[in-house]
Image (spheres, rainbow, N blue to C red):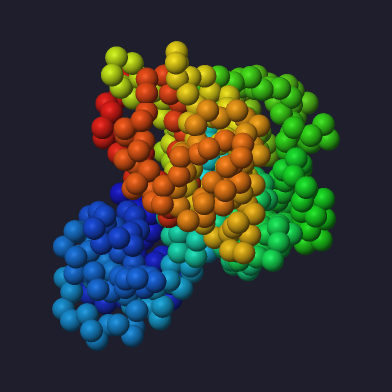
Amino acid sequence: MDFLWTTDELVAAMAGRPMGTMPAGISGISIDSRAVKPGEAFFAIKGDRVDGHDFVTSAAAHGASLLVVSEARLPALGRVAAPLIVVHDVLEALERLGRAARARARGKIIAVTGSVGKTTTKEMLRQVLSASGTVHYSPASFNNHWGVPLTLARLPRNADFGVFEIGMNHPDEIRPLVGMVRPHVAIITTVAAAHLGNFKNIEEIAAAKAEIFEGLTDDGHALINRDIAQFDFLEATAARVGVANIHSFGANVKADYRLVDYQGDNDGAVFWAAIGGRTVEVSIAAPGRHIAENAIAVLAAATLAGADLDATVAAFAEVTAGQGRGQRIRLAIGDGAFTLIDESYNANPASMRAAIALLAGSMPGEGGRRIAVLGDMLEMGEFSADVHAGLAEPLIAAGIDEIWIAGPDMAYLRDALQQAKEPIYRDSADELTAYALANIKPGDVVMVKSSNGSGFGRIVAALKEKFPPA
């Protein structure tokens, strides 16, 4: 059997102490006792809300081959059925294992960060790189202090590519994570006012994103969005930390990897990209110019990582928008149907504007309306009033037919819209859900966009529950 890790490798990498009759190796790693599979190791990480040590019995009952636990909690565990590897600190042990995984890795490693589009870019890389080899990637948004080392520790030694998403809410969060990942290619999708409440200004956000360049391999490549105001700063920062290979992407005529033209409709898009001296035509099943802009970064990264360009281009035909990130769903209502665009996973000013543009470019059915259903953008701090009120301009310019909003911060948008266009406003997502269920009509295109914590995912769920697929 091919193990992810032999037990001897685990013990050596984590400087652990084995207890009990150890298996020869493990097939996987889990930090969720409910999801652990037979043959896997369970790491009892202590999180903000729960401590994995409280669930070691459950993990053993679910078939965990061994348990990784801390020395300090050992006396309280009592008798456990599975063998143990005892370490000083479980998260630290996971980090050590992640570094060991990176040291033995044979494939090309790509890391993605950015205020907008990093998960979409990571998912596109996962899909299109699979046409050129085996791909290991961050599941969901495993992009923080435990998600990155966990994904890294799961990296098979023979993977052709590894794709890692790296997030941050504060300065100095990316630096230690990219130091573990050590990518061959590092992408900054964009810099925008996300988590703005934790920073003085957008320049501080750019500096925090630029930490990703510090972890690049000696021959690594930096990929920077040439269409953003922070490009010069990011380019200079990459050079200052010793990056020799700095590349740009975007629609800017000076971009090394360039979006030449774009044509989209409700079902997808075709765009043309200048890549490595060639102009390629790319079909994608996910509409939106912002998606095509991210796809340019994907094409660039894949090329720099040694993937076959023609295979990569062909693979884009199967790329679709993910749940909560622009996924389109046709739902039946009465004798017709309406289109739901699910953008409910996250929101900041830049992604809101992109979603509004996506809605504006969508074609309603006969008698239908373009409806923007918007919730609060969280973590805006003292800037919240300005950024929410600032959405009035793109909404009005786009000619959105109906604007339905809810949440305390969206009250700023309500007030900004009053003289130009009367919105439907409710205090909470649940109140707006009731309104939406009663007022959607055949032919409508309904786009739901908010930060995940605003609860607008419940609006999407309610619509999908009431109205069957068309």
On the rendered structure, is 359 left or right of 23?
Answer: right
Q: Is residue 310 shown above or below 88?
A: above
Q: Report whether residue 268 is seen.
A: no
Q: Is residue 114 shown above or below 168?
A: above
Which one is nearer the viewer's eye here, 470 or 210?
470
On the rendered structure, is 162 left or right of 86?
Answer: right
Which one is nearer the viewer's eye here, 181 or 169?
169
Residue 435, position as x, y percentages in the image: 35, 38
Residue 151, position as x, y percentages in the image: 45, 55
Task: Pick the quarter of the image with the C terminus.
Answer: top left
Q: Residue at x 30, y 82 (%)?
A: 73
Q: Residue at x 23, y 70 (%)?
A: 56
Q: Is residue 73 shown above or below 440?
A: below
Q: Residue at x 61, y 40 (%)?
A: 419
Q: How many marks?
A: 0
Image quadrant assignment for residue 350: top right
Residue 94, position as x, y percentages in the image: 43, 67
Q: Is residue 174 shown above or below 369?
A: below
Residue 158, position as x, y percentages in the image: 48, 46
Which one is nearer the viewer's eye here, 220 or 107?
220
Q: Residue at x 55, y 19 (%)?
A: 265
On the rendered structure, is 205 left or right of 243?
Answer: left
